[in-house]
Amino acid sequence: MFIDKARILLKAGRGGDGAVSFHREKYVANGGPDGGDGGDGGSIYLVADDHLSTLTDYKYRRKYEADSGENGRGNRCRGKSADDLILKVPRGTIVREHESGKIMADISGDEPVLICKGGRGGFGNAKFATPTRQIPRFAKTGTQGESYDISLELKLIADVGFAGFPNVGKSTLLSVISNARPKIANYHFTTLTPNLGVVRVGDTSFVAADIPGLIEGASKGIGLGHDFLRHIERCRLIVHVVDVSGSEGRDPVEDFEQINRELSEFSEELGSRRQIVVGNKIDIADSDMREYFASYAKEHDLDYMEISAATTDGTRELVNHCAEILADMPPVKVYEPDFVKPERGGRNRDFEINRDDDNDEWVIEAPWLERILMQSNVDDYESLMYFQNALADSGILDRLVELEVQEGDTIRIGDYQFDYIT
């Protein structure tokens, strides 16, 4: 089955912990702290791969996690940073944050796109040595990498998209004008996944896509309608292929109008996209049927051409016409990210203090301070002093005094509780 949407969980690697170590060497007294920093955790990147055309691989594996960095070692040896995890997706894949639905990235270019940044390695105790703190017995733990629940959505990138009912000759047309070799047979839905082909016109070229045949109700999701229509959104130009021979027993005018209705109902922008209307199978169509649709096209001022994909009659003229129109059209649409990642650390030192009367405690909400606390060893005096200095410098203690905190009151920061002592 054709898969062009997938939901996966990504988790970047955790940074390695800094080391607590003191130099030990024969004949060297008081070597001092020499604990090295931890290595950084691996990040997760997505990169476009033109050999992929669906997101099927991500249907069977839903969770991807990068490796963590190594812990620091003595003699100021830094832990090894973990390798980044590179995931390959079809070109044109849109990455959304699942819960909000906002776009995080459009994997349309050639460069890998960072989705989850790995955690930073913690500092070893050598970094905390000062003239007044010469024997630090603490180090920082590594930070956790980013993690996201994301949705992948494939929107093919093509200059020209072939739209039309099943079995009107779209695959045959693509095969005779490009390097594509789609599967072709005389039955409905031969094409279950979009096919791409490069069409060369002199010194230039453009990419054409054979979008699987649409049916009535496709814009409402009937069949695989949404999956197919989603791919046409990227196409700069639509070549609307119609079977003017009536070989399927259908009216070509009704076919044409039905497909246009589905395009408009799916997206107003898509419904107004520039079209070339192509009457195919003229080699087996009688003159009355050809005149019937040609009169309709003239009456509605359509950009209309007749071809026979099977015999290649008129296909070169169609290719040249497409190239002329594309030369004056804007490039393929690229979706700009609108998802803002939550702030991680940095210089933001905001905090909020609330009174929880039910539990008889003061609650300090400050994610940056929680990270410092988690990286501190509260059983070690020097480490605890380091945390308390950060607490004092932040202005939190002054604010507690303004709120009339009392001696012995309980203070909660994250999962930790303290008694307030002046």
Image: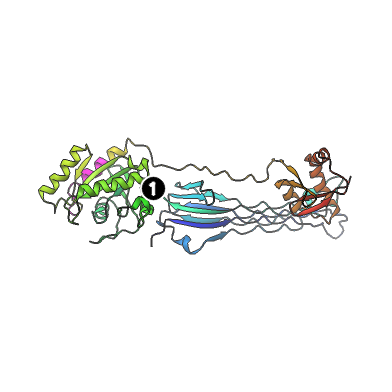
User: Who's the residue at 19% across and 48% down the image?
Assistant: 307
Q: Is 311 left or right of 101, judged from the image as shown?
A: left
User: Who's the residue at 30% across and 58% down the image?
Assistant: 182
Residues shaded magenta: 310-322
User: Residue 70: where, in percent of width, then height?
Assistant: 67, 59
Q: Is 12 left or right of 397, judged from the image as shown?
A: left
Farthest residue, direction bottom: 60
Disc 1 marks which amino acid? Ile
- Badge 1 is on which residue? 157
Quadrant location of residue 147?
Answer: bottom right
Instruction: Give whichever of 391, 222 is nearer the camera.
Output: 222
User: Who's the residue at 24% across and 49% down the image?
Assistant: 255
| In the depicted structure, whether residue 275 falls above or below residue 47 | above
Q: Is 133 left or right of 172, judged from the image as shown?
A: right
Instruction: Give whichever of 163, 334 is nearer the camera.
Output: 163
Q: How is the image coloured?
A: rainbow
Q: Is 156 within the magenta?
A: no
| In the depicted structure, whether residue 141 falls above or below residue 239 | below
User: Residue 7: where, in percent of width, then height?
Assistant: 50, 57
Quadrant location of residue 296?
Answer: top left
Q: Is 321 within the magenta?
A: yes
Provide the secondary structure element on which disc 1 rests. loop
